[in-house]
Image: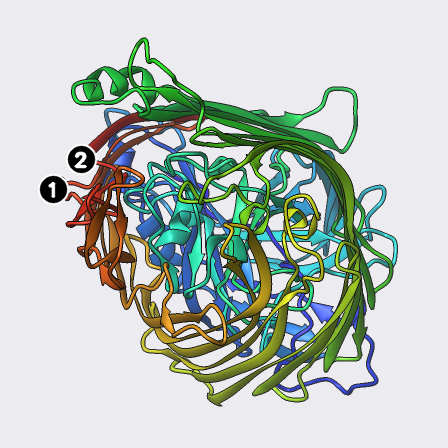
Amino acid sequence: MRFVIGFLTATLCSSFASAQPAPEPSAPLTRSNVVPPRLLHFEQANYPSRAEQRGLEATVVLVIAINSEGKVTRVEVREPAGEGFDEAAVAAAERFVFEPALRTGMPVAAKILYRYQFKLEPKAPATQTEQPPMLPRVGELRGKIVAGTPPSPLVGAKVTIRGHGVEPISVVTTVDGAWLVPNLDPGKYVVEIATSGYRRVSELEQVEEGNVTAVTYSLETSDELPLEVTVRGAALQREVTHYEIPRTEMLRVPGTMGDAIHAVEAMPSVARPRGLSGDLVFRGSAAEDSLVYIDGTPVSQIFHYGDLSSVVPGEMLERIEFYPSNFSVRYGRAMGGIVEARLRQTNPDEKYHGTAQVDLINARISAEGPIPKLRHWSFMGGVRASYFDRWLAPIMRDGASSEDGLPRYHDYQLYLERRLPGNGVYRMGFIGANDTFVPVLANPTNWHVPRQNSFGHLQSQLRLPLSPLVDFKASWSLGRNNSHIAEDDRTRNTTYTLGTLRSELSLKTASVGIARIGTDTLYAPFAVKAYSDRKSAGGELASIYSNAPQLTQYDIRGVYLRPSVYAEYEFAPSRRIDVTAGTRLDYTKDTNHFDTAPRLAVRYVLVDGPHSTVLKGGIGLFYQPPDPAQTLPQLGTNGLTSSRALHSMLGVEQSLTKHVTLSVEGFEKELRRLQSIREDGSGNQTTENNGRGRVWGADLLLRYHGGERFFGWLAYTLSRSTRKPATDEPVELYRYDQTHILNLLGSYRLGRGWEIGGRFHYATGLPYKACSFGLFNSATGDYRCYGTENQRRLAPYHRLDLRVEKSWVWPTCRLSAYIDILNAYGRYSPDKAVENYDYSGVKPLSRSLPLLPSIGVRGEI
């Protein structure tokens, strides 16, 4: 039995890092400067015995790191296949030997994608007098041709084999880009490849007696666009505090039910939000101080109500980028953190793929593939809807009130994509979501929807390399957002049309740096209809404790415009150091105010090599303009300006082993000009820029990654977040302060398609204020607080999530069945304190999930 293994399928993404030895600064980066690695020694993998007995075939995509000597230093599984194939492929790839990548003629380290294919071939029929196998006296030459980034098979390419004293042999590549020439005499042969639109290839290959020579060629387009190569060296990086969750891990984090963006909640610096809110709280900042983007478009929320699912399915994501602080100047208008969900490109294999998933919470389906009769165009789309309220509401009806509700949601996505020459791409699509609350009781009295939200955005992105040294990116979006909030008799309905335009021009400066200039503009006409107090608290609905509230009907319309420009330069004069310096200029039309935000980030490789030590630090200014409603005369206050934060951090990254890294960061945020609410003796409220605050702490992340069977991490954050609402008020703990935050998680593949995992989460209880005592007021007939309001804490929050998954893999499809158990031991964790009517005490309340098992099935083709 024979099997075909291994096709080199990628020539890597562009990087402009310096590597050893570095080229002269005057040498431009062109196709002639960069040569990808070439496989010299191929190692056959052992076919997994059980998979062979069951007749299974598979393909494993690996990421292979190659040093400047051509030796393999690290192998990671990018697209696993299970059933023992992953382990066999990694073991073989670790014994590969390459001719190293070249940059301006000098060997450098590189990282490549490698597709390992396991294929069974039929056994020859046995005979009664079976002879022992004889080693053939001829050899075989076979290979594969790919092109583009990501690499895809090139069909119909002509391959010609020429040798001394041998007539030329011509073959044409098949649908998977493969070609084969058997029964060749040992010797050297010239392999020529000629196909329209690509540069001609002529390579000398050696055929040995009794062996198979397997080669892969990645063709370059015939124009002068740059070759895309990832060269490992002193990598240029914009953010010093940057956590990225790879695709191989984000869909397998326990307790997420396969929802990738939930993996962010298990990273360092992420505090526990109030139950079912779906908020993201970073480093002691309020949820509204952080921004969430989907491919450059800001969205009002990334999670649906109830915090069970995100608005983007994981199978459409390439990666999740998370910046808890000290982010690049390309992001602004936020003092907290940034989360950006990056959508992946469609599969380049010109085949149709689909995914369907059903569990106790929701169901979703997605599909992608080429668009018929439109060359180079493809599509990707999906839809999801929840239904857990339909079976959970009857369970909760005993003891429920007419005000209790459960979330119900749906979302949808559709994108069209065209690949352009030189790794360019154009994408246009639509994304939307709708969330509402439905009552728990079947026929509630006086039911009103407490909160409702929906959005829909039309997006477009363009990535266009203009030359080997210049790259251009642009994106725009146009969408509509609707929000409804109700509290007591007060209501507020907001509708705004959000338009965004982003662009960035990058210029490589020889081999030591990259300069970027960009624009980032928001334009939003809005309308606010409210039934609320005459003077509302900072544009929000006034507190139910307002004295003698006078409810008024409002109908307000306006436009807010927030343009900005930014520039930054990444400088890496050596392999050990890189510096990023930039500044951002923002204008806020509703406050008529300019904000200038300079920022600096530095990374220094203290110890280079397999056990590297990297020091990093950053400092910068960050501004957040007030919410538009806070500046309206009818609901807010005139004269407000942007709040300001000074972020600083210092940290170290240590590579402990091949798979284990340790990162420790200390951080501080000094907050100024915070909006604070003041109330006069008549009950009127105004907002001022007099507040101050401070957040400080440290993050620790011990992470195991890149293994074939296991991944996991320990994330711990120690922090303190305080606020001083006004100069004449004392410093107090902020409502999101959590001293200790711990996440411990891991997932392990047992083999035969089985995987188990768990996550334990702990957080210090949230602070709250409580009155020390109350007295009965005979004039009003109720109790009033006559004591001091002291800060106290709720009980700590902790929860254990478990996940078990079983997968079955066939050549054309994959089926998985899983069970996610959220809050496995049924911990009741309060997140709110309600005072008794007479201020004699408080009652802790929890909106966190009870013990919730979710059984699901997922199919992929």
Residue ID at (58%, 56%):
686
Residue under pointer 2: 851
Within 10 angstroms of label 2, few (less than 14), some, or many (20 or more) residues? some
Q: Amino acid at mark 2?
A: Leu
Is 11 located above or below residue 72 in the figure? above
Instruction: Name the secondary structure under disc 2.
Output: loop
Most foreground residue, 784 or 535: 784
Q: Position of residue 637 (x, y in %)?
A: 66, 54
- Quarter of the image that includes the N terminus: top left
Residue under pointer 1: 825
- Contact between marks 2 and 1 (CB within 8 A): the answer is yes
Residue ID at (81%, 69%):
30
Q: Position of residue 163 (x, y in %)?
A: 71, 54
Is 217 located above or below residue 409 in the figure? below
Q: Quadrant of residue 853?
A: top left
Q: Is residue 660 left or right of residue 432?
A: left
The answer to which of marks 2 and 1 sits earlier in the sequence is 1
Q: Is residue 669 left or right of residue 566?
A: left
Q: Is residue 582 left or right of residue 118?
A: right
Most foreground residue, 397 or 144: 397
Within 10 angstroms of label 1, few (less than 14), some, or many (20 or more) residues? some
The reply to whether residue 688 is in sight is: yes
Most foreground residue, 847 or 783: 783
Is 257 located above or below residue 240 in the figure? above
Q: Position of residue 510 (x, y in %)?
A: 79, 80
Q: Give the Cα separation between the discs numbered 2 and 1.
A: 7 Å
